Amino acid sequence: MKAHIITHTHWDREWYVTFEIFRHRLLELMDLLVNELEKRKEFKYFLLDGQVVILEDYLEIRPENKDRLINLIKKGKISVGPWYILPDEFLIMGESFVRNYLYGKKILQSLGINGMNIGYLPDMFGHNAYTPVVLKELGLKAGVVWRGVGSKSRKTEFIWEAPNGDGILTLNLIRSYSNGAHFGGNIHELKEKFKREIEELKNYATTENILIMNGTDHEIPIMELPEKFSEWSKEFGVEIIHSNLENYTEEVLRENPKLEKIIGELRDPTYEPILKDVTSTRVYLKILNFEAQLLYLRYLEPLSAIAKTLNINPRINELDYGWKNILKSHPHDSICGCSIDRVHRDVETRLYSALENGLGILTKLMNDIPINLGERDKDINICVFNPLERDGKRIVELYASLDSPEYEIYDLKGNRIESHIEPIGIPIEEIFKFSSKRNYIFLSSMRGFFKEINPMRDFMNPLYKISFMADLPSLSFTSFTLKKREYKENKKLLESTLDFENNFYFFHLNNDGTFNIYDKINQVELKNINYFEDQGDIGDEYNFSPTEGEPLKVVPQVKVLRVRDKEFLKEIILEGKMDLPISAEGRKRNKEKVSIPFNMTYTLYRDFPRIDVSIDLENKAWDHRIRFGLDLPEDIEIILNDGYYGIVEHETKVNNSKEYVEENIPRYAMESFVSIIGDKTKIMVVTRGLHEYEVERKERETSLKITLLRSVGYLSRGDLTTRKGHAGPFIPTPEGQCIGRYNFEYSFIILNSSKEQELYEKSRNYLIYPVAISLPLRIKDWSFMDIPSELFLTALKISEDGEGIILRVVNIGDEGVYSLKSNIFNKAFIVDMKEDEKEELEGDREWKINFRKGEVKTIKFLKS
């Protein structure tokens, strides 16, 4: 046997103290490495936790040590990268994972060094089903994982495969990333630990090699340790070497072991806690993060790519600045909400910074691109960008300064468009709220702020909300004209009943604010949808732990504020309150009640099979969890949610045992949607930043519950009924109670079928809406690219080398040959996710590409 000792540190940038406090410890560690590694021949390798950001954090304070540090990395004595930061895998989008790698690579290239070719993921709270796609497409040699493998494999290596068939060699840190840490002990104690670990790991090894991870959180190494390895090798009868992960991987591959294959998500809590309820802790961070990623991936990067093709400033530096703020918020202790309050104020600031920066970029690109594409016009025109890769009927909304509401909207062919224009008073602070779609529809007023001599001018003018229904080409710019009515129309929004009917369903509002629908497509009635459930929570920032007693199915006091019928949509606006226990007392809930006020809007559409919900809620209670839910009249065995690049299937009943380190129940993480498809019922729920859902099965009934918020007051507690022991230090976190106002947005959507393509079409129609701006310009329809309906866009951006445009798509349809068409480009190449060329495609302005079902492909386009 050969024992590979990997000396390392695991560096949480912020957690139970702030980033700056941890950085002062980092200075001690890095100064030690720079000063000692040059002298110590036996100390051959040190793993710097796979994070390039550590180099930035150190060199910002110690620029004088840059050359010495770079020299050690070039010699291989310090392994860095490949990631910019180590992210949580369930609270980010797949493309954010790729950007993480690309920003790490960019920094390494600027320093003239290479990153480690191993996908090091040592302490994520479980692993996404589609992470193997990312690792494989980045050309990494292997992945490294720990939490969540559980009983799926008890071997030190396996092949990990995504649901689409992409697989990669994976090193399983079966005894954790700290199995050889000194934890402040001495070398003699470490010797005995190594001896025990070697004997234990022999039982799980797939080759003659075993891995001992000599380090843990923020640990500073014992520099003389490797000098003992020769002596210990003779004593143990095992070759002990100072090694690195790339050498270990090479040795494993050299023996060509027969490895077992495991498929999909790794979130098994049998042997190690996966801390699954971080998906709902400090939900405000999740919502901000979701909106920031969506803004950069589906609006800013595509607009920047379009600007590049038109020789317009693509705002690269501004994009980089925003992305770094987003990525620095993605480590698990940051985005998961499981740190001290002060840390999460910093995370919130970074995410707001990214969003505000993004709004500025969006406004400028939406101004600059139409100026290049359009012609000056005497009329007021509305320039609309459709970021969806599909043609279709969409509702466009924007705010504009007008002299009156007496306008009509016409398309380029002179056809009058269904529209509504209404005056609206907007406080300036509303412009900078990012919990819903409202931030994108202020573009006209923001344009004046950036461009006019007096930045306040547009804020002082009367604003009108313009809403209209239009057919929009995919990935396009088009324009519509505002014209004064020849007569004054005395039209008011219709006050109508609480019922609603379209071609897809019949809707009826109940007295408690829930609703019933008769699904015309599947011919089934669903009752009391969107009820609230509240339960006491005496857990911590990592895990829910219930108080005694059953969950409370809340019956709020509700009244209708108004009903507004705009012909192509109807809004039902409610005001209500729910009386909840004010806090927990021990393991029970307090008998004292507090009133939780809320406003809720249902938006119903004439032409779409969905019911949108927006809730403004003020939480005043401590120690509890609020969820919304729906009960379906059949027993469902499998539930579906979205992962990075495809669907993830989950069982609605799972095995649980008191022997598990953490409770195992059917509570899962989605990116944005969850779908139940049964014999009778076909429905999905799409959310903006709500990631946690749970399924409960009873006889002839399945309940789906989605967490709105969780209120807890400790970073970690050791007395949970749902997890064994602590997960971190015992520190009060009163701001984790999430007292205050929150906005939640989600949609219930009726489905025609069980096809994955429909799930993606309808969820994206809800999440990704057109963005518009009023300008004195007229644009003829301009479309960037035609993408077949089976392919779904995941990335459209400028290539890292700045020479071309990157398009990434996933095939949600069947295996086949699909054509991509563009009038802009005449060369195309298949590249990998790190944008290295694999093959040139034949064709000019049209390229036929073969796709497996579920396959992700990246294409680089050039003009010549």
Image (cartoon, helix red, strand yellow):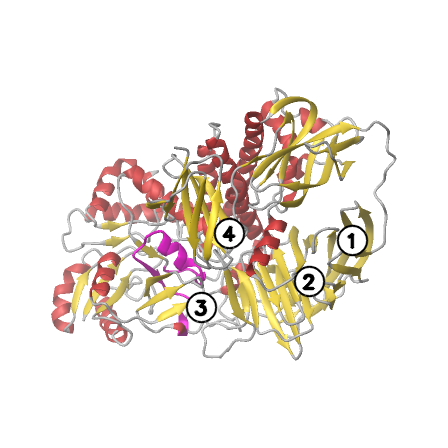
Q: Residue at x 30, y 60 (%)?
A: 215
Amino acid carrying label 3: it is Pro
Residue bounds of the magenta highlight: 122-151
Q: Nearer the viewer, mark 4 or mark 2?
A: 4
Q: Nearer the viewer, mark 1 or mark 2?
A: 1
In the image: residue 350, left or right of residue 839 = right
Which numbered marker is on residue 582?
Answer: 2
Outermost residue, right side = 490
Residue 158 image point, x, y percent: 33, 68
Disc 4 to disc 2, how far (Cα)? 49 Å
Q: Earlier in the sequence, mark 1 or mark 2?
A: 1
Q: Earlier in the sequence, mark 3 or mark 1?
A: 3
Q: Nearer the viewer, mark 4 or mark 1?
A: 4
Q: Inspect the image, locate mark 2, and give the three-letter code of the amino acid beneath it.
A: Ile
Identify the residue position indicated by label 4 in the image. 791
Q: Mark 3 and mark 2: span between their CA atoms? A: 30 Å
Q: Earlier in the sequence, mark 4 or mark 3?
A: 3
Q: Is residue 562 magenta?
A: no
Residue neighbourhood size for the residue with mark 2, other residues' Cα within 10 Å, grouped as few (<14), some (14–19), many (≥20):
many
Marks 4/3: CA–CA distance: 37 Å
Q: CA distance from mark 1 to mark 2?
A: 21 Å
Residue that numbered label 3 is attached to: 273
Q: Secondary structure at mark 1?
A: strand
State yes or no: residue 147 in magenta: yes
What amino acid does circle 1 point to?
A: Glu
Check disc 3 and report its element: helix, strand or loop. loop
Chain-order first, disc 3 or disc 2: 3
